[in-house]
Amino acid sequence: MLITGCARGFGKLIARHLDSKGFQIFASCLNPDSPGADDLRKSSSSRLQLLESDVTKNESVEKAVQFVKANLGSSELWAVINNAGILKGFLTELTRIQDFQDTMEVNAFGQVRVTKAFLPLLRKSRGRVINMSSLAGRIAIPMCGAYTMSKFASVGFSDNLRHELDMWGIRVISIEPEIFETDMAAGENIMMSVDDAFVSADEDVKKDYGTEFLRKFKTLTGRAFPPSPNMHKLLGDIESAVTLKNPDPGYKIYRNALVKFILNFYEACPVECQVFYGKRILSYFGSPKA
């Protein structure tokens, strides 16, 4: 199977786990010589093969297809796990259009590009497409506009593709975890993204939001929404998506029952209630008053 974005985070964890289960893994990385990719190579079996692939470039994805074809041997490609993803931006008004475009290019169009390229191989195996999305693809996350937009697109792509590929016997599964402790969710990376967004904003916008809001957000964000370190919770559902004859169309992954209850309750609330809760969250971070 092919897994994208394997140099760190979920991709690295998934590649290592499925390799330990005996699968032949093609681990795609933006830079296969990076420290994370090198660590994956050293900690995996000889079955795992690293390859370079940039999901935002057609030529790079096509080279990945040719590499997989040349190294499959007598096997068939069973699954494509579209894991590659990025997080950019902050509040919409403080986020550059380029950050929206970059996020969509990787998180949404990257999944489309890779899936289209590998579908001829998946038709032969009657395999499956597994798209790594997020609960942010079902629930709008304030202050993560670009990321939320891209994940809603990912979920919509999976839901549509599921109908289109059923005629070929190909399963399409959406994996939707909450916030887990990956490099993407690391506090220092979020702070850098916030600082970058604020610096690039117009002076009038900076004045309206104020530096106190920015300071308080950076101070409180890690305490308010600490990412879960229990990344192993993802692996069981990934294995089910890969191996079960009839996997679920989607897997929502939570750290515990309490978080599951809170997020499911929020998702079921009327929009007016969601806006009210969102307002309370922004107020907690010291948002400016109208």
Image (cartoon, rainbow, N blue to C red):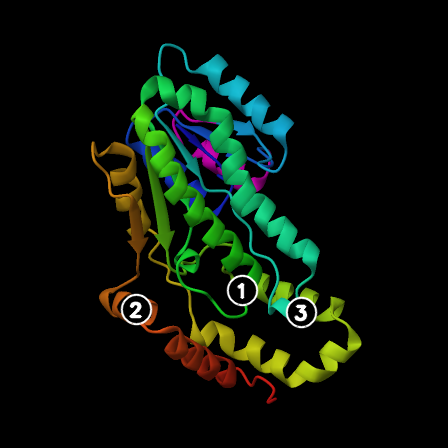
Q: Residue at x 63, y 33 (%)?
A: 57
Q: Are marks 3 and 1 in contact (CB under 8 Å)?
A: no
Residue type at mark 1?
Cys
Q: Secondary structure at mark 1?
A: loop
Q: Is residue 141 above or below residue 126?
A: below
Q: Position of residue 81 (x, y in %)?
A: 41, 36
- Residue type at the position of mark 2: Ala
**Residue 218 occupies quadrant:** bottom right
Look at the image and tell me whether residue 184 can be seen: no
Which quadrant holds the C terminus?
bottom right
Q: Give the magenta range.
A: 33-49
- Taking the spot 57% from the left edge, 44% from the top edge, the residue there is 106
- List x then y, in percent, for residue 224: 44, 76
Q: CA distance from mark 3 to mark 2?
A: 29 Å
| Residue at the spot of label 1 | 144
Q: Which mark is residue 94?
A: 3
Of the image marks 3 and 2, the number of the one nearer the N terminus? 3
Q: Residues within 10 Å of mark 3 (few under 14, many from 20)?
A: many
Depicted 213 relative to depicted 8: above or below: below
Residue holding disc 2: 268
Query: Is 129 left or right of 193, judged from the image as shown?
Result: left
